[in-house]
Amino acid sequence: MPFREMSDRDIRTIIAAFGESARRVQEAGFDGVQIHGAHGYLVTQFLSPKSNRRGDRWGGSLENRMRFALEVARAIRTYQAGHGEDALKILVNAAIKEPDNAEIHTTAVKLLLREGRYSDIENYITHLPETVRGLDAIDSMRTHARLLRLAQEAPPKEQLDALLEGQPANHEAAMQRIAVAVTEDDYPTAFDGLMKLLKIAPPTERTFAHKVMRTMFSVLGEDSDLTRRFRRLYQDSF
């Protein structure tokens, strides 16, 4: 029987079919779905470099090979919020099989961050070998995840601004305001807040603030004007 490599359109059609299946399951009264990602079926075929020989965005690097499973999860979440997590579990479980492979773990954490799984990032990193857990890329994403989680739990920025106006030394509120600014891509406000916090915070609370500063440099990139400007201020002050 003749066969051919799936086109991008073919892949998108199948991803959409997963979502439509979830819709029909929900309409039929079921609580959720489970994605079958083992035993050589399609999800596994995309994940494995032995079966996935593609040279486009769906193959090659680990991140690209994971793309199909993540897109399936997103399609299912369109209809069933909270029931599209199986694909991500499959990816994380695949990474756990190689505990000392830094590339796999870095990619897995990156994808967890992209999916907004901030608590899972903390749990995942905690169980990594110390040699991998201490890598700059892993530590930076861990800090980023903690910051975004802070923003999720923070009160509105107007309330934080009013609180800080009366209590400028409120370290918790100051870090929440920084976190909210980062989620809004308001990096000047975030940098200004960090510089102020580092000057007034006790030594025990400065470690995380320093990590946040270095993480923002990493997120913005070394070529960013903001990075260059605030790195000079940061180095001159600390």
Image (cartoon, rainbow, N blue to C red):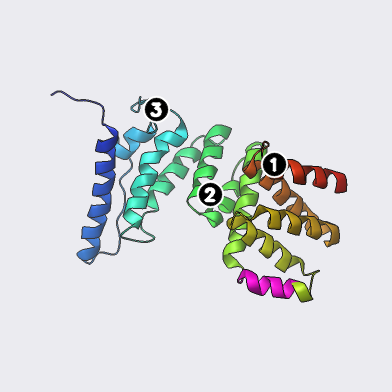
Q: Is residue 197 magenta?
A: no
Label 2: element kind: helix
Examine the structure image and report whether residue 162 is included in the region drawn in magenta.
yes
Q: Closest to the observer: 172 or 133?
A: 172
- What span is colored magenta in the figure? 155-164
Left or right of 71 on screen, residue 28: left
Q: Main secondary structure of the magenta part?
A: helix
Q: Which mark is residue 225?
A: 1
Query: In this view, which residue lies farthest toward the front?
Result: 225
Compared with residue 153, is residue 234 higher up or lower down, i.e. above or below? above
Give percent across and percent down for residue 97.
48, 37
How crowded pointer 3 is (Cα within 10 Å; few <14, some 14-19, many 20+) is rated as some
- On screen, residue 233 above or below 146: above
Circle 2 packing at 10 Å, graded few (<14), some (14-19), many (20+), is: some
Q: Dot 2 corresponds to which residue?
A: 113
Secondary structure under badge 3? loop
Q: CA distance from mark 3 to mark 1?
A: 39 Å
What separation in Å lies between label 1 and label 2 (alpha carbons)?
Answer: 25 Å
In the picture of the structure, the residue carrying the numbered disc 3 is 49
